[in-house]
Every structure is written in structure tokens, then in C-alpha cells.
Amino acid sequence: MSKSEADWCKKIEIWWLLRDIKEKGGYKYTTVSWGENGSRGSISIQVSICNEEKYARFIYTQTDNSTGEKKDFDYKVPIVETPCHLGGNRYWFKCSLYKSGQYCGRRVGVLYKDGDWFGCRHCYDLTYSSRKVNKKYRYFPMFRVIELDSQIDKAYAKAKRYTYRGKPTKKRRRIEKLNAEAMHYYQKFAQTKDKY
Ligand SMILES: [Zn+2]
């Protein structure tokens, strides 16, 4: 893995991962890649929400930057559901990283991979603050992405319904707008990272 690949911050959004899960009967196996033609690496994800145990299983191989040693990863991140006020369910990842020996367990809509594992923005210390932006200035567009992602999480938690009389609700449109903005900054982040 090249330096730029190792530095790459990958992210997976739950709503994107589960967008077609209902048609697939609550189970799917998919490959996700980053960068042009997977130049930033790819991973396999097995998703199951049809049984009591709901999870996303992440499978990938990573090459250590300094030793060149290949390491295989295969682990499950639990998916939890919360009931919607007006029926139906909302799904979240339950971050299963340990930070300073403490299990995280946070309910989040987006997981990032800024190291070896997929975890939440809190575990990777990716939450927005000007202090950190100064420290990690190269990440600047990424901080905007994370800020937007956290707004999406909040809007998603509050949204009572997504459609009303067959039309997307105001909340839904807001989430889509935030998502489009997050995508824009993520692409910007991609371009910045390409320079290194
Ligand atoms: Zn976490």
C-alpha cells in the first residue's frame, strides 16, 4: 500500500449501505472501492438485518506501511435499530472500537477508517475543532465532511417520516442536501490528498 493509500480516510454511510437491502431480503454481500478504479483500495462487506443479530461484516487485507506485511481483517460491526415515531425502523452502526481500553458503543450513521479499523468520528478524533484543523490542516475538507455527517446523524435521528403523500418531506430534503454537500467536500478532500 502506498503512502497516499494508507493516509486515505475511507467512510461508509449506513443509509447508503442499506439502500437496497429490503429488495435483497435483508442480506447482501458487496464490494466497496475508493478512488478511481479502486486505486485507494477496496473492501468486502457482508450485511445482514434479516435475523435477530444484525451486523455489517468487514473483510479486507491491509499492507503495513513500514514493514510491508499483509494483514487480514474480518470482523463484525453490530447494526442496531431504533423505532421511528410513525412506524418503520432506523438503522445505525454501533461503533465497536476500544479507545484507551474503553468500549465505544456509540450509535452512528457513518463509520470512518482512518487507521486499521472502521470506527466512529469520536474514536478517530475526527470531530470538528479549529485546534485540530490547525494540527491536521491537510484534513480541512474532511473536517467539513465530518461536521456535515454529524448534522445528518442528528437530522436522521429526528426525522419522523421520509415521505408525505408520496413526496419527500422537508427533513428528507434537508438530509439529501447535507449529503450532497458532504459528497462535494469528500471529493475535495480526495483532490487535496492526491497532491501528497
Ligand atoms: Zn467509536
Image (spheres, grey):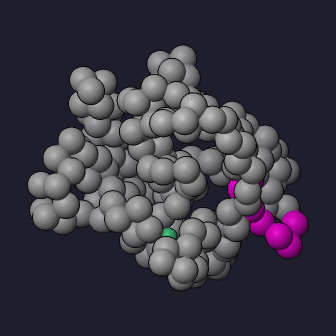
| The residue stretch that appears in magenta | 51-57
Q: Position of residue 33 (x, y in %)?
A: 57, 30
Query: Does 155 sit above or below residue 149?
Result: below
Residue 191 visible to an observer of this rendering: no
Which residue appears farthest toward the front when viewing the image?
67
Image-based side of 139 in relation to 154, left or right: left
Image quarter (top left, top right, bottom left or bottom right) of the C terminus: top left
Was residue 52 drawn as part of the magenta stretch in this picture? yes
At 80% from the left edge and 56% from the top edge, which residue is drawn? Answer: 48
Q: Is residue 14 above or below residue 51?
A: above
Image location of residue 167, percent across then percent down: 48, 53
Up the image or down, 70 lies above or below 39; here it is below
Q: Nearer the viewer, residue 128 or 100?
A: 100
At 78% across and 41% down in the image, what residue appears? 29
Asked whether residue 183 is drawn in magenta, I would say no
Residue sitting at 68 percent across and 63 percent down? 77
Examine the image and state in which quarter residue 55 appears: bottom right
